[in-house]
């Protein structure tokens, strides 16, 4: 089973998957519970939906850099980053981000394990 | 679950890709430069930084985001200048600032030049861009250059002084050699003349008062010539000194004894204001020579009588100038205490226009009186050999004052 198959079957830790444009294509139940968004509400929305406003610039620059260079700097290792819920609450979470090329297009997936009660 | 329909139109995707390409290039470019670049929000919270900044603070790029710049970049406090961290006072009216700051990381010390620019991305919500340049090396080379320059200036001063000394020594040596040869070649003819005068003086008596008068004048003239020769020989001799700790007050007394007849003849009152002075290393005979010279000058300036004041004491040198300073050719350091001897007269004083020339060899205002113009120049060179100084000025109430200063 590859990384993305595992991500799609993850049932306890929140998972989000995006396409090359950074638009959300998949979330799981824990994600919906933690973030307060329903699947319908987030599908097709930009990933910045769950990133605090202060980090949008960094996200866009880093994401664009990776697409241009293919050089990963933060993939596949635990990162402590803030995430934001539908209600606008910011919380610390451990992110593990993965990327894979499918049919010439990148897809990105992340597990987001909250480090505090949400 | 993948969405069945495309989430964006082809147009949007191509526009997005184009913008992503631009952003990607920008990110690579900003991270390729050596200066650190940081964006913060209006509260100083880091929104983005380049690789150089992450390296500077020794953190991973992603971990830096969201932190306060003040916490991450801990600058050394500079109490002297009351410098505040550039990430503080973000609400101050100063939009753009540049300054140098100190940063210590373990044993390493850095000097950073940090410029801060306010960007009004949204009307009320400013963003700040900090560009941080490591100028440690520049500052170090600057300091080294400055030091090298000051060393150069110093050695230039030393060289100039050495050159001046060599010139003085050459002049002295030349005059000395000339003096000796002149003195020696004149001495014998003078002796013959003197013997001749003595011979004729013995032959003439009361019957020829005119002849006696002429012979006496001739004898006086000869005495003066002898005195000139004596001074010339002194001058050539003045370069070797024997230093011993001596009491200046007693040397002055001794010198006064040598001229007591002249003092009496001119009706000059002598006043002594002596303070106790520790022994000063000097050549007793040479300094006595200088003092006699100065006292004789004073006597000559008071043909109708007056007061000769001799004053000694200690003086703490406060003002720079003359030979007081830290230059290599200075004799005294500021703050140093020196022994002072002053010879004051109530005579005619020295015309201001010649005051600057009195130490020049062969300069005299008393050629008619048999002045050689060597007295003060010899005095000055003797004092120079003692690393002592002489200063001659007119007194406010008339007359002149010579001030000698010696190292204790």
Image: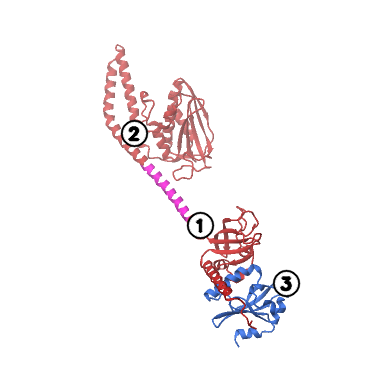
Chain colours: A blue, B red
On whether disc 3 and disc 2 are found on a single subunit, the reply is no
Q: Is residue B301 left or right of residue B66?
A: left
Q: Earlier in the sequence, mark 2 or mark 1?
A: 1
Is residue B91 visible to the viewer in this orientation of the structure?
Answer: yes
SS category of the residue bearing label 1: helix
Magenta region includes residue B146: yes
Q: CA distance from mark 3 to mark 2?
A: 110 Å
Tell me: residue B303, above or below residue B69.
above
Residue B240 lies, in percent from the top left, at 38, 40
Q: Which mark is residue A87?
A: 3
Tell me: residue A2, above or below residue B314.
below
What chain does badge 1 belong to? B
Q: CA distance from mark 1 to mark 3?
A: 51 Å
Residue at 42%, 46% (x, y): give it: B157
Q: How many marks?
A: 3
Q: From the image, which quarter does the N terminus of chain B lie in?
A: bottom right
Chain part drawn in magenta: B143-166
Is residue B268 visible to the viewer in this orientation of the structure?
Answer: no
Q: Which mark is residue B139?
A: 1
Q: Nearer the viewer, residue B214 or B178?
A: B178
Q: Residues within 10 Å of mark 1 (few under 14, many from 20)?
A: some
SS category of the residue bearing label 2: helix
SS category of the residue bearing label 3: loop
Q: Which mark is residue B78?
A: none
What residue is pinned by disc 2?
B233
């Amino acid at each position: 089973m590859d990384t993305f198959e595992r991500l799609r079957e993850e049932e306890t830790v929140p998972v989000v998957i995006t396409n090359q444009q950074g638009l959300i294509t998949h979330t799981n139940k824990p994600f919906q519970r933690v973030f307060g968004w329903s699947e319908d509400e987030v599908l097709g929305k930009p990933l910045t939906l769950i990133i605090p406003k202060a980090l949008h610039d960094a996200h866009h620059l880093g994401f664009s850099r990776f697409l241009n260079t293919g050089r990963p700097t933060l993939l596949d290792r635990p990162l402590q980053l803030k995430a934001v819920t539908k209600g606008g609450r910011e919380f610390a979470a451990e992110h593990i981000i993965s990327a894979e090329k499918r049919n010439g297009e990148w897809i990105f997936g992340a597990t987001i394990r909250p480090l505090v009660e949400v | 679950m993948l969405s069945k329909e495309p989430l964006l139109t082809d147009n949007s995707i191509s526009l997005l890709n184009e913008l992503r390409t631009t952003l990607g290039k920008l990110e690579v470019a900003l991270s390729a430069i050596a200066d650190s670049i940081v964006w913060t929000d209006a509260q100083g919270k880091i929104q983005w930084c380049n690789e150089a900044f992450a390296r500077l603070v020794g953190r991973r790029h992603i971990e830096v985001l969201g932190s306060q710049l003040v916490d991450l970049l801990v600058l050394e406090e500079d109490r002297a200048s009351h410098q505040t961290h550039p990430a503080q006072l973000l609400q101050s009216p100063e939009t753009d600032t540049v300054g140098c700051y100190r940063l210590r990381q373990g044993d390493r010390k850095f000097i950073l030049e940090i410029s801060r620019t306010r960007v009004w991305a949204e009307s009320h919500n400013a963003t700040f861009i900090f560009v941080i340049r490591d100028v440690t090396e520049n500052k170090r080379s600057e300091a080294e250059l400055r030091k090298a320059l000051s060393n150069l200036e110093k050695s230039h001063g030393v060289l100039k002084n050495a050159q001046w000394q060599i010139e003085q020594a050459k002049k002295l040596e030349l005059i000395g050699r000339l003096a000796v040869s002149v003195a020696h070649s004149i001495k014998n003819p003078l002796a013959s003349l003197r013997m001749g005068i003595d011979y004729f003086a013995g032959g003439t008596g009361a019957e020829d008062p005119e002849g006696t008068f002429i012979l006496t004048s001739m004898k006086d003239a000869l005495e003066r010539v002898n005195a000139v020769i004596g001074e010339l020989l002194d001058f050539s001799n003045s370069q070797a000194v024997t230093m011993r700790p001596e009491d200046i007050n007693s040397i002055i007394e001794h010198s006064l004894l040598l001229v007591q007849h002249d003092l009496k003849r001119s009706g000059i009152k002598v006043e002594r204001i002596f303070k106790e002075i520790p022994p000063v290393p000097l050549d007793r005979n040479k300094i006595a020579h200088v003092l006699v010279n100065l006292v004789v000058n004073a006597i000559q300036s008071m043909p109708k009588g007056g007061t000769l004041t001799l004053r000694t004491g200690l003086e703490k040198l406060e003002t720079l100038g003359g030979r007081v300073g830290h230059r290599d050719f200075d004799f005294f350091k500021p703050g140093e205490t020196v022994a002072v001897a002053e010879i004051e007269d109530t005579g005619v004083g020295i015309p201001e226009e010649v005051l600057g020339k009195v130490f020049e060899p062969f300069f005299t205002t008393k050629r008619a009186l048999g002045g050689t113009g060597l007295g003060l120049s010899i005095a000055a060179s003797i004092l120079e050999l003692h690393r002592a100084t002489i200063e001659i000025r007119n007194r406010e109430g008339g007359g002149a004052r010579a001030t000698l200063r010696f190292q204790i």
